[in-house]
């Protein structure tokens, strides 16, 4: 003969077994978040001034003093890579009078030379000049030069 089944005891044992099984399950670990992609880094490594440039856009006749009729080249050297960056060259005369300002959007993937130039058919006034370089609006270099009379 079988002993009588105590229904409340049976329900309690089943509930405890279910709770024990549920407690043993650990939630699946969530995947670690991917690190954000490294920010593209580009920096100005130099500014060259001269009277002419070569096919590689590098200055071939360096100068810091120019004749009134010269075309004045400013080559901005950068390193690094970026999907897009803006270089600005601002040429000024004596006390900061703006001579010329121009910008170029670049997408370098290593060392790069970017050329800017100014010319004036009737000749530059003698005096002290400066070219200031900005990379994405941030001052990144400058070079002083002069024009003789």
Image (cartoon, grey):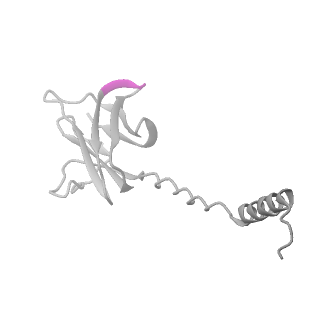
61, 89: nearer the viewer = 89
Pinpoint residue 78: horizontal percent, then vertical percent: 36, 53
Where, quadrant-wise, is the C terminus in this rendering? top left
Q: Residue at x 46, y 54 (%)?
A: 37
Outermost residue toward the top in this view: 97
- In the image, the segment drawn in magenta is 95-99
Q: Residue at x 61, y 62 (%)?
A: 28
Where, quadrant-wise, is the N terminus in this rendering? bottom right
35, 19: nearer the viewer = 19
Residue 122's quadrant in the figure?
top left
Residue 143 part of the magenta segment: no
Residue 112's quadrant in the figure?
bottom left
Pinpoint residue 148: horizontal percent, then vertical percent: 28, 37
Outermost residue toward the front in this view: 1
Q: Residue at x 80, y 58 (%)?
A: 11
145, 100: nearer the viewer = 100
Residue 64 against residue 12 in the figure, above or below: above
Q: Is residue 94 left or right of residue 102?
A: right
Q: Is residue 101 left or right of residue 34?
A: left
């Amino acid at each position: 003969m079988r002993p009588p089944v105590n229904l409340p005891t049976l329900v309690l044992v089943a509930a405890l077994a279910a709770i024990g099984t549920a407690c043993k399950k650990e939630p699946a670990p969530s995947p670690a978040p991917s690190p954000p992609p490294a920010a593209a880094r580009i920096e100005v490594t130099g500014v060259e001034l001269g009277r002419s440039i070569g096919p590689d856009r590098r200055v071939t006749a360096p100068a810091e003093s120019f004749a009134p009729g010269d075309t004045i080249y400013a080559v901005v050297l950068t390193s690094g890579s970026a999907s897009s960056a803006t270089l600005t060259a601002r040429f000024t005369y004596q006390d900061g009078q703006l001579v010329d300002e121009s910008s170029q959007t670049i997408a370098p993937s290593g060392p790069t030379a970017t050329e800017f130039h100014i010319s004036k058919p009737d000749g530059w006034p003698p005096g002290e000049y400066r070219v200031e370089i900005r990379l994405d609006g941030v001052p990144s270099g400058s070079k002083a030069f002069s024009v003789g009379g």
